[in-house]
Image (tube, rainbow, N blue to C red):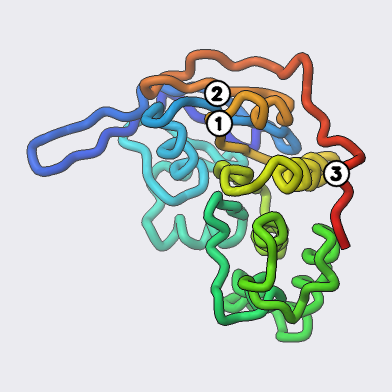
Amino acid sequence: MALIELKHVFKDYQNEEVVTPVLHDLNFKIEKGEFVAIMGPSGSGKSTLMHILGFLDKITKGEFLFGGKDVSMLSDDELAVMRGQSIGFVFQAFHLLPRTTVLENVMLPLIYSQVSAEERSARAKAALDSVGLSHRLEFSPSQLSGGEKQRVAIARALVNNPSVIFADEPTGNLDSKSGLQVMKILQKLNDDGHTIILVTHEKYTADHAKRILRIKDGVIESDDKVLNRQIAAASTDLVK
């Protein structure tokens, strides 16, 4: 059973009498443990597709199965619960709270869970350790480099042990060395069994995945394995 399956999915946006079609008859599966890049130019529909897969938006027509369950007709509240339980997000702009510490930022997704304060702290520290930031727990975001901010965002995405981690242009605001560090972390997480979905317009970044879905004008143009995969080099070890 696939983790994610789309069957004849369409997405339209309606503004008064104007209907704008965005996604057209999408059909594909993503298995648990895959590392898939969704690649396309601006306006291709890749962000809309990510929002649907991450339970941030709903399809107009078709079927969206997650773990074998049809989630197409779930309410906004039900989608929010699914999102909190199953999805971790890493965005280009980091989205860290400026007046809270690194540790507190990573603990945020656990605030409304049934996890004790002690367990929240332990899980956040473990997530930060996995991205090489155990020495930055009490720092504020303003004291971090861009690469460190993105690593905090990855730790925050990990803390709920989600089924899928979405990385939306995760290297877009970073220099090349920091970008490679981020890709190295994502590859390591995938090696450890995490399902990663990377959204990007850059082929070099997409080539760090194992499979590339190319989308153009709301249609899947191609769906191929990466033959000459980029492996983030050992020389990009995290700076302590």
Q: Earlier in the sequence, mark 3 or mark 1?
A: 1
The residue carrying mark 1 is 5
Classify 72 as above or below 26: below
* Residue 157: quadrant of the picture: bottom right
The residue carrying mark 2 is 28
Marks 2 and 1 sit apart, C-alpha to C-alpha, by 6 Å
The structure residue drawn at horizontal position 55% and vertical position 14%, both measured from the top left corner, is: 222
Q: Which circle, 3 or 2, is nearer the viewer?
A: 3
Classify 186 as above or below 20: below
The structure residue drawn at horizontal position 75% and vertical position 71%, both measured from the top left corner, is: 124
* Residue 147 in view in this figure: yes
| Dot 3 crowding, Cα within 10 Å, few <14, some 14–19, many 20+ | some
Q: Residue furthest left?
A: 17
For numbered disc 2, what is the local secondary structure?
A: strand
Q: Amino acid at mark 2?
A: Phe
Q: Which is more toward the observer, 155 or 17?
A: 155
Q: Are marks 2 and 1 in contact (CB under 8 Å)?
A: yes
* Residue 145: quadrant of the picture: bottom right
The residue carrying mark 3 is 236
| Dot 2 crowding, Cα within 10 Å, few <14, some 14–19, many 20+ | some
For numbered disc 3, what is the local secondary structure?
A: helix
Q: Amino acid at mark 1?
A: Glu
Residue 235 point in image, percent of width and height: 90, 41
Residue 160 has which mark?
A: none
Residue 174 point in image, percent of width and height: 64, 47
